[in-house]
Amino acid sequence: MSVREVFAFPEIVNDYAARCTAGLVVALAVITIAVPAPVQTWLAGALAVGFALRVAGGPRYSPFGRLSVHVLAPRVSAEPKMVAGAPKRFAQSIGLVMSGVAFGLFLAGQTTAASVVLGVLVLAALAEAALGFCLGCWIYGQLQRAGVVSEGACVDCADIWARPEMRARN
């Protein structure tokens, strides 16, 4: 098995599993904000490691990803709703950066700043979990429109507002 195969992210993912994972991220981030300072650092580190594992290989290496794919998502819907994987990986990368920054801030003793960063992460993950709006996916689409990301990289996500489920919300 090549390194590329080990760190391959799925081309398509179950949106219900992604939303369940986002819900688990919300729960862990809220708990992290709420517990005392020494525990916050460890939980923020665990949150960052989880994002790193999901960026590295999708749900394959992540406990939250595995739980979502194999246990939670099938309970939400028997039929998976498949969506493009590239924007989801991009969103996980943003989560990795944010949780990594929060972890670093907790290590530096800047608990208020770290909690604010996690609060923003909670809002983004909550939008995905509760509303099905992936902020990272939206940013990915904007980067496609700007020509930073090739339109061919994800045809499905170039204009998320053109999707039937998004038009119904407007």
Image (cartoon, rainbow, N blue to C red):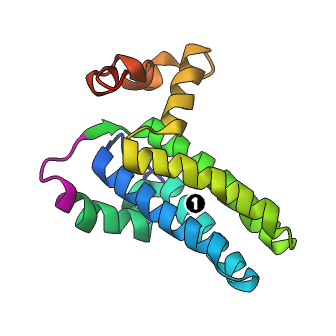
Question: Compared to 40, does 55 lie above or below?
Answer: above
Which residue is denoted by mark 1 in the rendering? 52
Q: Determine if the magenta segment contains residue 75.
A: yes
Residue visible at 44% across and 50% down in the picture: 8
x, y percentage for residue 64?
A: 41, 67
Span highlighted in magenta in the image? 74-81
The three-letter amino acid code for the residue at tag 1 is Ala
The quarter of the image holding the C terminus is: top left
SS assignment at label 1: helix
Residue 75 falls left or right of residue 111:
left
Overall secondary structure of the magenta section: loop
x, y percentage for residue 71?
A: 24, 68
Q: Determine if the magenta segment contains residue 38.
A: no
Q: Tell which of 79 and 130 is nearer to you.
A: 130
Question: Compared to 119, does 167 lie above or below?
Answer: above
x, y percentage for residue 50?
A: 53, 66
Furthest residue to the left? 78
Residue 119 figure quarter: bottom right
x, y percentage for residue 28?
A: 53, 70
Query: Would residue 2 be visible to someone looking at this image?
Result: no
Query: Would residue 77 be visible to someone looking at this image?
Result: yes
Q: Tell which of 39 and 8 is nearer to you.
A: 39
Question: Compared to 136, does 61 lie above or below?
Answer: below
